[in-house]
Image: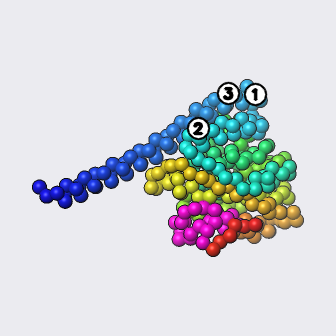
């Protein structure tokens, strides 16, 4: 029996085992993350009920304490730039990009006090996860019924302090930003409060669902300068959306460390929005 075919077969087998091992590690880490979410949600729900007795945005400080511990299980670091822009004592609409199930960890690193969140209604039915979101004051909207979503947004516009919204509307890991939906911007204009964009760098250098790897890494979080809406009307919303999207996309490409799948290269001639 010739040596080369045996070596080639052994090499192929080794490569297959390495690939399977990486995929197995990926699924194991994702499973652990989901298990952490459900377990911590159950424990945090009990703590929130004992501490505050029910649903209130004040519970977010308790939830954040639990969630911020997740990063130590995965060797993740969050480098936050200009966080003071989120801490100013004024109402605002905060918009950020939405990449994966890991976004919750990044959210809790910078979530300001008394900031409510908008989430799709389906999350309310995820057992203890839905319960802890409800107790944390999250507002749930039915994306299939625009009238319900508009009612929630109008209610927030009347009594809001700070609101955190993902304007892409869904998770997106394609290496770029999706077009923004306009709800967050109508809300900001209606309430005449500024928009504060928050940009998270791409997770693709350490977390990739297509290539099945999940390693340690660093996420850069850039808080951009507030975009004023004073004096604007509903007719100005399309231009407002475009301004915000361009600023966030430029920053995203600049702070992300890996080439983007659409052909743009992070940091190649683009500068972060000021």
Q: Is residue 19 visible?
A: yes
10 Å neighbourhood of mark 1: few (<14), some, or many (≥20)? Answer: few
User: Does 253 lie within the magenta span?
Assistant: yes
According to the picture, the residue beneath numbered tag 3 turns out to be 46
Residue that appears at 75% across and 31% down: 54
| 45, above or below 11, in the image | above
Say left or right for 72 vs 198: left
| Secondary structure category for the residue under label 1 | helix
Find residue 225 and report its horizontal and vertical position in percent: 78, 61
Say left or right for 134 vs 126: right
Q: Nearer the viewer, residue 19 or 128?
A: 19
**Quadrant of res 182:** bottom right
Which residue is outermost to the top? 50
| Residue 134, numbered label | none
| Residue 37, numbered label | 2
Q: CA distance from mark 3 to mark 1?
A: 9 Å
| Secondary structure category for the residue under label 3 | helix
Find residue 129 and report its horizontal and vertical position in percent: 61, 37
Residue that appears at 84% across and 57% down: 193
| 63, above or below 179, in the image | above
The quadrant of the rendering that contains the C terminus is bottom right
Range covered by the magenta-colored residues: 247-268
Mark sitting earlier along the chain (1/2): 2
Find residue 183 and report its horizontal and vertical position in percent: 72, 58
State yes or no: discs 3 and 1 in contact (Cβ < 8 Å). no
10 Å neighbourhood of mark 2: few (<14), some, or many (≥20)? Answer: some
| Secondary structure category for the residue under label 2 | helix
């Amino acid at each position: 029996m010739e040596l080369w075919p045996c070596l080639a077969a052994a090499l192929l087998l080794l490569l297959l085992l390495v690939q399977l091992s990486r995929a197995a590690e990926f699924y194991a880490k994702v499973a652990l993350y989901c298990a952490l979410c459900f377990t911590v949600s159950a424990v945090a729900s009990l703590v929130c009920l004992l501490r505050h007795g029910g649903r209130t945005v004040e519970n977010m400080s308790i939830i954040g304490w639990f969630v911020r511990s997740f990063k130590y299980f995965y060797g993740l670091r969050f480098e936050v730039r200009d966080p003071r822009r989120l801490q100013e004592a004024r109402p605002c609409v905060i918009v950020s990009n939405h990449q994966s199930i890991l976004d919750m960890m990044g959210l809790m690193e910078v979530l300001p006090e008394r900031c409510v969140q908008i989430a799709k209604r389906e999350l309310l039915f995820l057992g203890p996860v839905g319960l802890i979101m409800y107790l944390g004051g999250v507002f749930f909207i039915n994306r299939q019924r625009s009238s319900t979503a508009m009612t929630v947004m109008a209610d927030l516009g009347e009594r809001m302090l700070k609101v955190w919204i993902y304007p892409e509307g869904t998770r997106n890991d394609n290496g770029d930003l999706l077009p923004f939906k306009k709800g967050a911007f109508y809300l900001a204009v209606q309430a005449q409060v500024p928009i504060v964009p928050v940009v998270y760098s791409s997770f693709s250098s350490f977390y990739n669902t297509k290539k099945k790897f999940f390693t340690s890494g660093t996420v850069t979080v850039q808080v951009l300068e507030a975009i004023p809406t004073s004096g604007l009307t509903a007719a100005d919303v399309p231009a407002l959306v475009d301004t915000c999207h361009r600023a966030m996309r430029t920053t995203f490409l600049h702070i992300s460390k890996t080439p983007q799948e659409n052909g743009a290269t992070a940091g190649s001639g683009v500068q972060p929005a000021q």
